[in-house]
Amino acid sequence: MSASTDAPRRLTVADIARRYADGQRLATITAYDYPTAQIVDAAGIPLILVGDSLGQVALGYESTVRVTMAEMLHHTKAVVRGTQRALIVGDMPFLSYATVDEAVENAGRFLQEAGAQAVKVEGGVRSARIIDALVKAGIPVMGHIGWTPQAQHGMGGKVKVQGKDRGAARAVLADALAVQEAGAFAIVLELIPAQLAEAITARLRIPTIGIGAGPGCSGQIQVITDVLGLGDFVPRHASPYADLRGIIAEATTRYAADVEAGSFPGEAQTVRMDDAILDEVLGRGDHDRAGSGSIPVGGIPLDRDL
């Protein structure tokens, strides 16, 4: 008789679709490493994005444009290893999907090498052909429109809300419809007016995941460092739920002080051995232990009469 197992099952895009159909809001967050992914997964977050935002918040780059496929795959593998339940989305980095062939090859690596279940692609109308090709290749795709960081240089360089005037709003709506018709299972709406995001959400058949797009989306996504209060800057659309930057600073300051004072490590952190064994190793006798014998230097006993 085979033993039953209670091992958690990883969510699929079909599970996300069912939650959306049932009216459940989709809490989504980024993660970039194994221990953080473990915590986020255990908390029940259904969607984890290994975002190219890691370039700025984890690698210290000035923008996401610097992030490479190798870096994305490296971090995605770590997040996948740290999770059992969440659906993991790998963020396609800059210039990794410029052509259909490149897109299919690189997206395939996210699934085959890194173990992700889906990829995210920036762009609406301009990326519809890429999304369509990926979906037809059997690769689930999350879209991303509004402010798209990889295209920041073509969008004026400065981070700003998209879709505020008539023409821009129509363009964002067209992008949303194009992503849906191309076959994406969900779409990120970044930095667009709340009313526009709500209207787009009402018109689509797939969930919208907002970031700086108001409360009317099907779900929300935040960068993990913003949620945890790890960064030195808090975007307007973020709300820190902790102050880990302060906690870590206090902890490391206390640690350094204890080391300098000689109070760490203490007895609880120290392992001792049988003194007799040490005496044998060092070649010491009873008179040596009494202070009249050789003095070990580098593990080699030296005669004090030399």
Image (cartoon, helix red, strand yellow):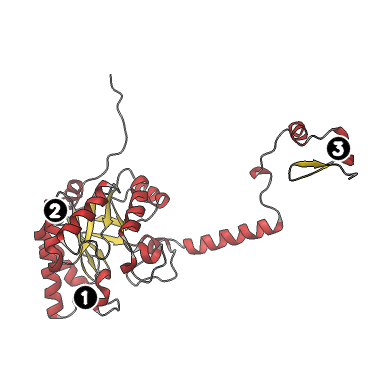
Q: Is residue 30 visible?
A: no
Residue located 14% across and 65% down the image: 176
**Marks 1,2: beta carbons within 8 A:** no
- Where is mark 3, residue-wise? 288
- Crowd tier of the residue under label 2, counting other residues whose Cα lies within 10 Å: few below 14, some 14–19, many 20 or above: some
Quarter of the view holding residue 126: bottom left
Give the Cα separation between the discs numbered 3 and 1.
Answer: 80 Å
Q: Is residue 233 visible?
A: yes
> In this figure, what is the number of numbered marks?
3
Callout 3: SS: helix
Label at residue 135? 2
Give the Cα separation between the discs numbered 2 and 3.
Answer: 77 Å
Query: Along the horizontal axis of the image, is 284 left or right of 59?
Result: right
Dot 2 or dot 3: first in sequence order is 2
Label at residue 162? 1
Give the Cα separation between the discs numbered 1 and 2.
Answer: 27 Å
Q: Nearer the viewer, residue 151 or 4?
A: 151
Dot 1 or dot 2: first in sequence order is 2
Tell me the kind of residue under disc 2: Val
- Crowd tier of the residue under label 3, counting other residues whose Cα lies within 10 Å: few below 14, some 14–19, many 20 or above: few
Task: Report x, y in % for residue 100.
Answer: 15, 59
Q: Nearer the viewer, residue 236 or 91?
A: 91
Query: Along the horizontal axis of the image, is 273 left or right of 49?
Result: right
Discs 2/3, front: 3
